[in-house]
Amino acid sequence: MKKAYDAFCTIEELICGAILCIIVALAFATAIGRCIGHPISWTVEVSQFFLSWLAFLGADMALRHGRVLGVDLLTRRLPKKAQAVIKLVTDILILLVLISFVKFGIDLCRSNYKRSFQTVGISYSWATASLPFASVFMSVTIILEILQQVKILLGKEEAS
């Protein structure tokens, strides 16, 4: 199971890297097009589409690597078990929020299926799908974090 998850994480990182390259290439193409007097109108919408996916998939990567904003000023001097309890509670709250993102994100996709990007004609639902899709991935990451904190609380593993 760990190998499958690690492979998934690697694929997610490669996809995010590719999306970032696409966004940069589109921005460059747009700038060149404007300079030579032939603006490319569809690149802005395609970039916005890819940016929505990059933002949410990148959030999962940040969450997995512990790179999200946190306030540890009050907790860093607490004992490891107390830190684990606080982390467990906050992770459970985050999981509840992510579950609501999945539910309401699916509703958002359904409500946006008739709306389309003006120049490329694809449904806006494909962009809004990034929220519930990535929220499922972040939920898996948070569940793994919760299991880690439970192991620490049960004394089966050292806190990192």
Image (cartoon, rainbow, N blue to C red):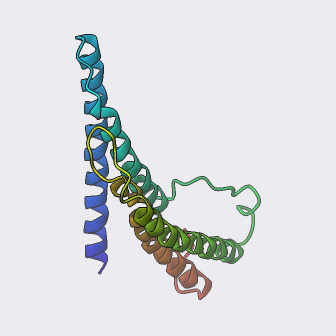
Left or right relative to 58: residue 90: right
Visible residue check, residue 112:
yes
- State the residue in front, 53 or 3: 53
Q: Is residue 138 visible?
A: no
Q: Position of residue 112 (x, y in %)?
A: 41, 58
**Residue 5, picture quadrant:** bottom left
In the rendered image of this protein, does residue 33 appear above or below residue 95?
A: above
Q: Residue at x 26, y 74 (%)?
A: 4
Q: Disc count in the image?
A: 0
Q: Is residue 58 above or below residue 159?
A: above
Question: Image height check: is 56 above or below 156?
Answer: above
Tell me the quadrant of the picture where the C terminus can be found.
Answer: bottom right
Residue 133 locus on image (x, y percent):
38, 65
Outermost residue to the top: 36
Residue 33: image x %, image y %? 24, 19
**What residue is drawn where x is 41% and y is 57%?**
128
Residue at (27, 20) in percent of width and height: 39
Q: Residue at x 27, y 60 (%)?
A: 10
Q: Position of residue 121 (x, y in %)?
A: 27, 46
Q: Quadrant of the N terminus?
A: bottom left
Question: Is the residue 30 above or below the residue 34 in the image?
Answer: below
